[in-house]
Image (cartoon, helix red, strand yellow):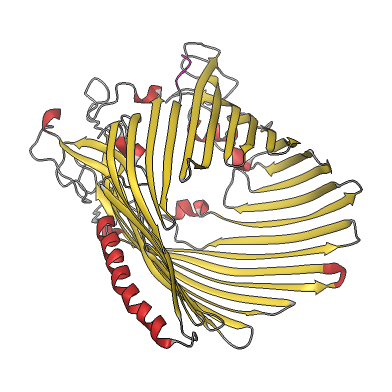
Amino acid sequence: MKKIRFLLMFFFILVALPAAVPVSAAEGDGKDEVKVFGNITAGWRMFEDVDGDDALFEEYRDLDDDLFGTVDLEVYRGSLDLYLQTTRLRGRDWGKYSFELFYDETPHNLSDDARSPWSGIGSAAPVLEGTTIPPLSSWSSFDYDVDRDEFGGRVSLFFATPFYVTFGIQRRSQEGIRPLGSGDYFLNLELPEPVDYTTDDLSLQGGYRGNTFQAQVTGSWSRFDNDDRFMTRPGAAAGDVMTLPPDNDYGKVAADLSWRELPLQSVLAVRLSYARLESDFSVADLGLTDVSDLDRTTFDGEIDYTRGAVALSSRLTDTLDSRIHYSFLDRDNDSTPVSASHAERIFDYREHRAGIDLGYDFARHTRLAGGYAFRDLDRRNLLEAEESTDHSVFIEVRNSSLEFFCARLRYERLDRDADFGNRGRGTDPVADSGEWIKRYIRHYYATDKSMDEVRMVLEFYPVDRFDLGFEYAYKLNDYDETDIGLTGDERHEFYADFAWRAAERITFGGFAGYELTNADSRHRQFGVGESAEITDDTGGAFNWGSERDEDYRTCGLSLDVREFLGKLALHLAWQYQDSDGEVHFASATGGLEDIDRSDDYDRHKLEARLTWACRDDTTVTLSYLYDRYDYDDLRFDDYEAYLPAGGVSGSYLTGAYDDRSYEANVGYLAVSYRF
């Protein structure tokens, strides 16, 4: 497809330019003179050698085609400007209108060479031919990938007054296959889920732009369509299906207002918006016959979002400035509950935020800033934490009084108080163990929390043409009221970088970084007929804890040489990344084995590019890329397409993401012509 687009665009250039140039010569008076500027690049990928997972190497790019190219074109005639860039065309007539047309393709390669015993891969109803699972050697092979296409346009009209109107339309489509996990105690499957989505968007915007007052009103509508409402599970009981993303409609109206040149050099900004998400669903769409557990067979989804925000920035004195802000968000969920007993699971909330920031400029280029923020979140129908309140403060100092040195130091503190409301569930820790344990489980996003964060940035300019920077950040989250769940996490970040312009045409650069993260959590193990009370460790019921550590290191170097040997330019860049994760376990009964390979990887990347300006308007580029990625994780040891009966009987995998390592060598040659 990219080859076809490039050839069509190149054909357009060949036809359009000869037609435009004679007009320029014929007019003579210069009033409608046509001027054309542009750049055309054509290239040939000389070789591509990938050993390992080429899907990961090409995850968001297409390197299969041997030929590639880009086109940039600018056309001026009078007050009309046109700008063409490969698959994007922009134009404007100053003070009258502007427009844009675009088309984009984005591949998403997930995993290659997956395998399945079912036929009908890519459909919503894969089936098994015959009555038994055939040998692995006879399974079909396929790739997990999703292709995304997007096209549309925008038109803006400008009137003689400060008013303007903009209209936009676009369509996004996704098509392909992605892995979908499904399972229970008796059947675990990794299925090829079909992806066939279409999203249509419309937008209309109108506004006024004055010297001291600006206003803008925007309306948008979006419709999402999925051709597959559900997917059947091969080998499962009749009517055993999985729902896929449903069709839905989304609409939004927003208004933005701002006033300038108010007293105290103030600027006032106000934003209001309202949005609604709707989706209808019927059990009949799934072909189900047993609906005895449901109160109804049709469901209406409706969620409304109402937002508002106001901010006032002022210059109180020559050295003191302020910013006062407030915002609210109301999420109102009027969706139909699955059954009357599930009505409490309809989740909505209301949030209020407010704060004030102050900044003071001292002598000798020193600035001190501080602020306070308040947040109240009311979660309706969430029993575990109906309400939480945040109080946060920060203080920051900056200094640039020395010509060779600049520093910034910031500290932030947050305290969250949550109203934990589900301690009374269940009456017996054994008979009601599933409900009893909820007395102690707290999710990190809705529980008491304290946070401390420090960030320091130092920049040095010791000599001309040499810059050196250091940055350190520390963050600690403490969930001190949590019995079961995440109890705390800590993070350190160190980074340094430099740039040395060694000569007029030679520049060296480099960076290095190190990150250390640690997360602690507590858990409870119990089974049927065992106690969920966390103070009771008997038999197979016990408490255990985990500590996850991760070390991340990275560094890189670059060299740029311009105009050496007359018309040559050289770019070299090397980068290294390494991540080492470990998980440590502890329990009163022991017997838990630590994990020393958790999401471990290292990556080496080298780029070399040589550019030759053979003429004033023509350059030739020779480039080479080496990329090696090694991934190691205990979860993928002995991972195969088929999980035999020695594991879990009747469970089948497809091999998605089974090998996440690769080593790639790519070289290409490109010619660019400017006119």
Report which quarter residue 86 is drawn in. Answer: bottom left
Q: What secondary structure do most residues of the magenta stretch adopt?
A: loop
Does 567 sit left or right of 95 as displayed?
left
| Picture coordinates of residue 481, whole percent (x, y) | 68, 32
Q: Is residue 386 above or below residue 133?
A: below
Q: Residue furthest front?
A: 566
Does 317 sit left or right of 440 as displayed?
right
Does 162 sit left or right of 588 as displayed?
right
| Residue placed most toward the observer, 441 or 97 | 97
| Picture coordinates of residue 198, whole percent (x, y) | 33, 62
| Residue placed most toward the observer, 407 or 343 | 407
Question: Residue at 54% across / 15% down in the picture?
Answer: 587
Question: Which quadrant holds the N terminus?
Answer: bottom left
- Magenta part of the chain: 593-597
Question: Residue at 39% across / 32% down in the picture?
Answer: 627
Q: Is residue 508 above or below residue 583?
A: below
Number of on-image labels:
0
Q: Is residue 551 above or below residue 15?
A: above
User: Can see residue 548?
Assistant: yes
User: Can see residue 181?
Assistant: no
Report which quarter residue 55 is drawn in. Answer: top left
Q: Is residue 573 above or below residue 28?
A: above
Residue 595 sits inside the magenta stretch: yes
Residue 560 sits inside the magenta stretch: no
| Picture coordinates of residue 17, whole percent (x, y) | 34, 73
| Residue placed most toward the observer, 193 or 645 | 193
Question: Residue at 73% across / 61% down in the picture?
Answer: 326
Question: Which quadrant holds the C terminus?
Answer: bottom left
